[in-house]
Amino acid sequence: MNVREELEARLDLGGALVNDVEVDGGSVKVVMINEVVPPDPSDDFYSGPESEYAQSAGVLFERAGTAFSSPADALAAGIYLTNAIKWPKEETAVPKELVERSIPVLEAELALFPRVEVVMLMGDVAKKCFNAVCKKRGGRNAVPSGSTYKLRSSEITYDGKRVMPSYIMTGGNIQIEKSKVQMITEDIAEVIRLIGA
């Protein structure tokens, strides 16, 4: 299936930037949810190997010791990457309006993958959006409040899935905050262990 075509058939995307990628929905075991789409759609995860997000993800996958080095390779191994916020942000913080507009799109996107075992939440915005989807469906947040640093060591489950809070995997900060890069790679390695990829 093509993710964008499936989502367009289910709801009015209203200009949301969603992945235009072919996926076997039943083979996806992991969904990694990053913060926000890039300002330029050609820099997103599945826009080509030279895109900014693809390169950031590839470096993290390699550092985690995986057998793949790009989002396309990860997808072939059952790991799907997406963004919580489906419209580019124009300021440092993500406006509440963008969060509210993005939640129904993220919810519909997650519904495309019935066999997910692990959801990685790459940053606080991803955690907030995923919690909103879970609260809408089941009346409660999946991830408790608290700092990612502390939550990382918790074994959080929701609806039979392991939920792993981590850090944003794209953007300039990833080049600066080496400790966060180390933690992200540890989290990715743990996901690989969990799904046996």
Image (cartoon, rainbow, N blue to C red):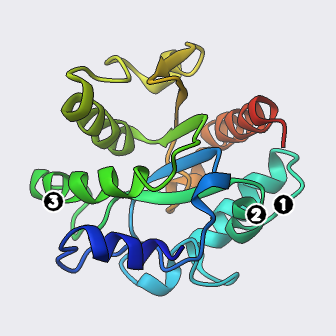
Q: Quadrant of the N terminus?
A: bottom right
Q: Residue at x 57, y 14 (%)?
A: 155
Classify residue 179 by image quadrant: top right
User: Badge 1: few (under 14), some or many (20 or more) residues near its Cα, within 10 Å?
Assistant: some
Question: Amino acid type of disc 2?
Answer: Ala
Look at the picture and state if 157 lies above or below 19: above
Q: Considering only order in the chain, which callout, 1 or 3, is on the residue closer to the N terminus?
A: 1
Residue at image mark 2: 76
Residue 82 image point, x, y percent: 48, 60
Q: Residue at x 15, y 59 (%)?
A: 101
Residue 179: tell me if it is visible. Answer: yes
Residue 73 image point, x, y percent: 78, 66
Look at the picture and state if 97 lies above or below 5: above
Say which of 185 and 72 sits in front. 72
State how far apart marks 1 and 2 are (Cα): 9 Å
Q: Quadrant of the C terminus?
A: top right
Q: Which mark is residue 68?
A: 1
State how far apart marks 2 and 3 are (Cα): 30 Å
Look at the picture and state if 122 lies above or below 152: below
